Image (spheres, rainbow, N blue to C red):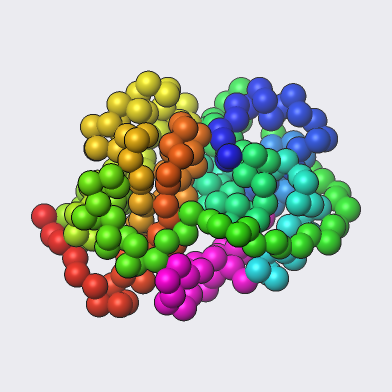
């Protein structure tokens, strides 16, 4: 499963790891990047508009062919170990990794840097050199099953005592309108502001428990456009949660279908 890895772990892996920087190109080029990192900007793997409505639709996922081309140009194969990072506590990098998982990359080969670029550069070297890679012929193989769920399953989860529906947006957004029955967990509540990485495990589990999110329950995640839930999804899987569902359509789809919202 996708996990968090330390800067030490990344540094020790050498050439056996594909490091992906999902920041904008001007940041990658102008501010420097991790040694060996390749730039795959967030906007390059983000659909321009919301996908078609379906039982468990693609939402903001890119076209499979476009995704395969991006990874091919980055020298990535289906057997590559990948670590991704950004400069926003990992939320954009997590989206890259979740996209890879949904398109069939082995989750055990997907890693999120614990901390971000700002954290890395405080203690470790960066570079302005762009590595030369040999392009590959990456092929997408959609898995037989994914964590994706559609709006009907989301609505059912709110009435299921064995499930918890989680809104990962900010308080103000939640108060203005959320899916009925959802609990609030701002994704940033699981981030340590000093390290810019994940809270220590005991603290993270306490934050989750306070919101009613415990390992024994099925967790169903949503936000606005599936970016923020990507980070929470990676956190929960890293912490050992086994049943984590991912509403890719999120509120963009929910509201487009005219479904009800609650306000506080």
Q: Is residue 94 above or below residue 14?
A: below
- Tell me: 256 left or right of 139: left
Q: Is residue 152 above or below residue 39?
A: below
Q: Which residues are magenta?
A: 40-63
For the point 55% across and 51% down, the residue is 98
Q: Quadrant of the N terminus?
A: top right
Which of the 4 image quarters holds residue 9?
A: top right
Q: Is residue 18 magenta?
A: no
Residue 117 or 94: which is nearer the viewer?
94
| In-image side of 78 versus 123 (left or right) | right
Number of numbered discs overlaid on the protein picture: 0
Which quadrant of the figure contains the C terminus?
bottom left
Locate residue 238 relative to residue 193 in the image: left or right. Answer: right
Whole-percent x and y of residue 253?
Answer: 36, 71
Q: Nearer the viewer, residue 21 or 118?
A: 21
Percent position of residue 182, x then y: 23, 52
Vertical comparison of 213 with 140: above or below:
above
Residue at point 47%, 32% (across, down): 240
Find residue 87 and report its horizontal and vertical position in percent: 53, 42
């Amino acid at each position: 499963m996708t996990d968090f890895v330390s800067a030490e772990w990344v540094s020790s892996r050498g050439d056996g790891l594909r490091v992906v920087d999902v920041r904008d190109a001007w940041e990658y080029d102008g501010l420097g990047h991790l040694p060996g990192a390749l730039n795959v900007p967030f906007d390059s793997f983000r659909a321009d508009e919301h996908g078609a409505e379906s039982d468990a639709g693609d939402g903001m996922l890119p076209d499979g062919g476009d995704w395969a081309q991006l990874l091919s140009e980055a020298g990535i194969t289906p057997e590559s170990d990948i670590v991704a990072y950004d400069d926003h506590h990992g939320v954009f990098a997590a989206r890259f990794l979740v996209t890879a998982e949904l398109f069939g990359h082995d989750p055990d080969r997907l890693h999120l840097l614990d901390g971000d670029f700002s954290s890395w550069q405080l203690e470790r070297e960066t570079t302005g050199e762009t590595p030369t890679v040999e392009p590959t012929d990456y092929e997408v193989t959609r898995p037989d099953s994914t964590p994706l769920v559609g709006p009907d399953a989301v609505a059912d989860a709110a009435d299921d005592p064995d499930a918890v529906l989680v809104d990962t947006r900010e308080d103000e957004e939640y108060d203005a309108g959320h899916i009925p029955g959802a609990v609030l967990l701002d994704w940033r509540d699981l981030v340590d502001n000093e390290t810019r990485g994940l809270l220590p495990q005991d603290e993270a589990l306490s934050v989750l428990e306070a919101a009613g999110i415990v390992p024994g329950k099925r967790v169903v995640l949503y936000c606005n456009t599936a970016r923020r839930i990507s980070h929470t999804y990676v956190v929960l899987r890293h912490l050992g949660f086994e049943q984590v569902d991912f509403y890719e359509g999120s509120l963009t789809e929910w509201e487009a279908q005219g479904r009800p919202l609650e306000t506080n």
